[in-house]
Amino acid sequence: MLRDTILDFVENRITTHDLEEWFVPRLPALIRYPDSADADVISAIELGLTELDLNIRTREDFVEFLKQVLREHSVVITYLRATPSTVNQTGSSNETSKQWPIGVYSANIIRASSVAVQ
């Protein structure tokens, strides 16, 4: 949700005011986990909004800043098999037996700095 909202701002689907209206009430919940993957992104938004309010940064500069932040702190979710096993499938006597992997998958969150943000 956080990155979706930032992307909406970066792509001009919401205004700076809309970003602030979404961000500020959620800030206590967002900063609850300072070591999370979102911590640096949240800090960047706070800094950027403050600099924007103080006329240190233009909206265009803020957008470019957030694009860079998204590039550096992108999160990719991968699904890896937690318990590998196979199931045999056998057809007619003329076919060979096939093994299909089955198992329980677990989600792993990794940072991917190579994810492109245009």
Image: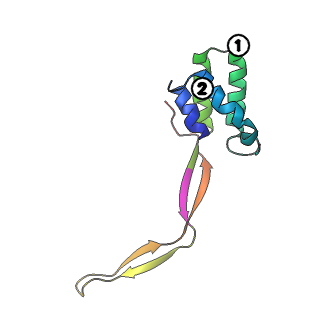
Disc 1, disc 2: CB below 8 Å? no
Residue depicted at 69% across the width and 22% down the height: 49
Q: Which element carries disc 1, helix, strand or loop?
A: loop
Closer mark to the observer between disc 1 and disc 2: 2
Place residue 61 in its image quadrant.
top right
Mark 2: few/some/many CA within 10 Å (<14, 14-19, 20+) = few
**Horizontal arrangement in the rendering, residue 88 relative to residue 80 (left or right):** left
Give the prevailing secondary structure in the magenta stretch. Answer: strand
Report the front residue among 17 and 38: 17
Residue in the image at 61% along x and 38% along y:
2
Colouring scheme applied when the structure was drawn? rainbow
Mark 1 is surrounded, within 10 Å at the Cα level, by few (under 14), some (14 to 19) or many (20 or more) other residues, namely few
The mark total stands at 2
The quarter in which the N terminus is drawn is top right
Does residue 94 lie above or below 56 as drawn?
A: below
Q: Is residue 50 left or right of residue 61?
A: right
Q: Secondary structure at mark 2?
A: helix
Tag shown at residue 6: none
Q: Quadrant of residue 43?
A: top right
Q: Give the mark nearer the N terminus: 1 vs 2.
A: 2
Position of 81 with respect to 94 (left or right) is right
Question: Is residue 80 one of those drawn in magenta?
Answer: yes
Residue 88, how many percent across, how many down?
A: 39, 81
Q: Residue 21: percent from the left, percent from the top?
A: 65, 28
Residue located at (24% from left, 88% from top): 93
Picture disc at residue 18: 2
Residue range (magenta): 77-81
Residue behind mark 1: 56
Residue 10, image x and y in percent? 54, 26
Q: Which amino acid, mark 1?
A: Ile
